[in-house]
């Protein structure tokens, strides 16, 4: 019987119990010695369970232990071995889950690293950094992700610097083109004015010749006087402009245009007067504002008065003047109170 049971140690617990259940029942009915029952029936199962446990077949170990416990309830070694098998089975299941999670985590990391490298190749640095940060959320010490992120940040800074330099270059080129265009327009205007003056002189000479030829001395004299008035008015306009008498300069231009509506010099002078007037107003307005900001109400009022003399309807100058007046009144009030306080102190 020992030999038959030993030959069945290689069978699974279920198969062993199935093929020997009838025979086992017969043995159980005939064997009354508990030690003999242990040796003849239970021990081969224990040997099989131990072999399964050693071979890391924990489910089969539990099944065999359950057969033993069905034969002898409370069998200590079988209960202990079953608990160990269950514990080891749970530990291996947990280990497999951890390994699976680690593989999935590594796969995600590899995918993010690959996506980051692809984004670097297409200069999509923001997405590359985002993929690196996703890796570092799950693995804050991932050296490859840290190095890759630092590399991307350096590349992005270099790209931004290169884009800034390119933008500066385009801006300079645009400014150069604008300046060149303005220079060409000014040169063309100068040449056009010279050509008009040359034609005017030619026409004037032709008229003089015709007058002399026709003997119209009176007409010549009137034209000469008219030209003299024009020259006098133009000179007066230039002088008024130089002294920033913009109304006087414009009046001289109107005088010339009344004598000759097509006089180019008068029109040009009028344009220069308006330009100079606008520049002067802007300068005075800025200076008055600065003086007001510095609480220098005396300078602010003087500048506003000068500005309003040039442009009496300038609302910005009126506003600054009003604020400067308020500041002056407040300053005067403070001085008055100080003087009153000093007078009271002297009386005491």
Image (cartoon, rainbow, N blue to C red):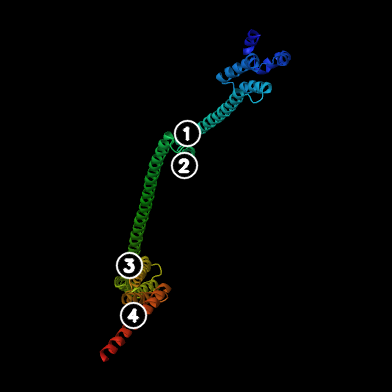
Is 174 left or right of 83, judged from the image as shown?
left
- What residue is shown with label 3? 208
Q: Quadrant of residue 292?
A: bottom left
Residue 113's tag is 1
Q: Nearer the viewer, mark 2 or mark 3?
A: 2
User: Sequence-wise, which precedes: disc 1 or disc 4?
Assistant: 1
Quadrant in which the N terminus is drawn: top right
User: Sequence-wise, which precedes: disc 3 or disc 1?
Assistant: 1
Q: How far apart, in angstroms, are the residues tagged by discs 4 and 3?
A: 69 Å
Closest to the observer, 135 or 116: 135
Closest to the observer, 342 or 120: 342
Seen in the picture, residue 89 relative to 227 is either above or below; the reply is above
Mark 3 vs 1: CB contact within 8 A: no
x, y percent for residue 21: 72, 16
User: Sequence-wise, which precedes: disc 4 or disc 3?
Assistant: 3
Mark 2 vs 3: CB contact within 8 A: no
Residue 126's tag is 2
Q: How far apart, in angstroms, are the residues tagged by discs 1 and 4?
A: 71 Å
Q: How far apart, in angstroms, are the residues tagged by discs 2 and 4?
A: 58 Å
Closest to the observer, 247 or 106: 106
x, y percent for residue 266: 36, 68
Q: Nearer the viewer, mark 3 or mark 1?
A: 1
As helix, strand or loop, the secondary structure at mark 3 comes to helix
Q: Residues within 10 Å of mark 2 (few under 14, many from 20)?
A: some
User: Sequence-wise, which precedes: disc 2 or disc 4?
Assistant: 2
Residue 331's tag is 4
């Amino acid at each position: 019987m020992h030999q038959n049971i030993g030959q069945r140690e290689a069978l699974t617990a279920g198969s062993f119990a199935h093929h020997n259940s009838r025979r086992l029942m017969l043995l159980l009915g005939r064997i009354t010695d508990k030690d003999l029952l242990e040796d003849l029936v239970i021990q081969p199962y224990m040997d099989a369970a131990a072999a399964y446990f050693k071979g890391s077949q924990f489910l089969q170990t539990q099944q065999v232990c359950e057969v033993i416990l069905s034969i002898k309830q409370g069998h200590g070694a079988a209960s202990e071995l079953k608990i160990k098998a269950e514990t080891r089975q749970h530990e291996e299941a947990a280990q497999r889950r951890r390994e699976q999670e680690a593989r999935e985590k590594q796969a995600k990391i590899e995918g993010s690293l690959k996506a980051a490298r692809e984004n670097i190749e297409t200069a999509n640095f923001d997405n590359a950094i985002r993929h690196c940060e996703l890796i570092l959320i799950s693995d804050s010490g991932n050296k490859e992700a840290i190095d890759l992120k630092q590399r991307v940040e350096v590349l992005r800074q270099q790209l931004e610097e290169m884009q800034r330099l390119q933008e500066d270059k385009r801006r300079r080129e645009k400014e150069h083109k604008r300046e060149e265009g303005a220079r060409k327009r000014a040169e063309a205007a100068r040449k056009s004015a010279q050509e008009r003056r040359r034609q005017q002189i030619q026409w004037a000479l032709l008229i003089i010749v015709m007058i002399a030829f026709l003997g119209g001395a009176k007409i010549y004299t009137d034209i000469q006087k008219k030209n003299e008035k024009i020259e006098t008015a133009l000179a007066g306009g230039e002088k008024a402009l130089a002294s920033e008498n913009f109304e006087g300069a414009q009046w001289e231009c109107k005088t010339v245009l009344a004598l000759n509506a097509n006089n180019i010099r008068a029109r040009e002078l009028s344009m220069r007067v308006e330009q100079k007037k606008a520049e002067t107003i802007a300068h005075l307005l800025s200076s008055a504002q600065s003086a007001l900001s510095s609480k220098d109400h005396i300078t602010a009022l003087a500048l506003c008065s000068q500005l309003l003399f040039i442009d009496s309807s300038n609302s910005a100058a009126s506003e600054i003047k009003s604020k400067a007046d308020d500041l002056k009144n407040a300053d005067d009030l403070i001085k008055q109170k100080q003087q009153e306080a000093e007078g009271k102190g002297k009386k005491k």
